[in-house]
Amino acid sequence: MEKDQQITPAEWRVMRIVWSLGSTTSREITELLQRRVDWKAATIKTLLHRLVVKGALATEKQGRAFIYRPLVAEQATMSNAADSLFDNICERRVGKTLCHVVEHAELSKNDIKELTAILIKKAPDAPDQVQCNCVPGRQMNCSGVDHD
């Protein structure tokens, strides 16, 4: 899957199932999704087709069933989605956005240990203030404060 081919929120739901099961039928995907969301089977088949076209899933017909398996790694796909998000926000808002994510995410003790080690390692070289990147080639007076 090319990096610029974004997975939609609905497609993420499909991918979570396929990543979790490794290899599964369209019927099983449909049954699992219909327990969680009110989608018709045709909608789910459309999502599966889109993911095949994007190169995220492989499909193979076995008898009357279609078998799906992931062609993209789960962590790499999540990392690309996060990179895409952070590439599109003001550099000055990255820290606050990460704080929001960390505050609201359920993290294991090991996750917290890894995050702490990364922050300790980055701290000595961190600038006092991150430069705004909202308007390329210009030094902006962005305060990093919401202007609503």
Image (cartoon, helix red, strand yellow):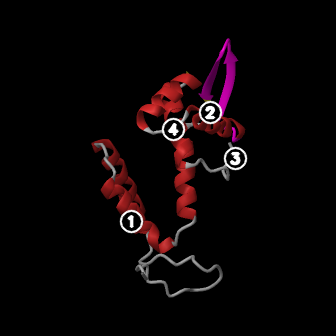
- How packed mark 3 is, by other alpha carbons closer than 10 Å (few <14, some 14-19, many 20 or more), is few
Q: Name the residue tied to disc 1.
A: 123
Q: Quadrant of residue 36?
A: top left
Kindly report the distance in space between the C-alpha atoms of the residues bearing marks 4 and 3. Answer: 27 Å
Q: What residue is at 36 percent from the left and 62 percent from the top?
A: 100
Q: Name the residue tied to disc 2.
A: 45
Judge whether residue 138 is colored magenta.
no
Q: Name the residue tied to disc 4.
A: 39
Element carrying mark 2: helix
Q: Nearer the viewer, residue 147 or 141?
A: 147
Say whether disc 3 or disc 1 marks the residue closer to the N-terminus: 3
What are the residue bounds of the magenta stretch? 54-69
Kindly report the distance in space between the C-alpha atoms of the residues bearing marks 3 and 2. Answer: 21 Å
> Could you tell me the amino acid type at mark 3?
Glu
> Could you tell me the amino acid type at mark 1?
Ala
Q: Quadrant of residue 10?
A: top right
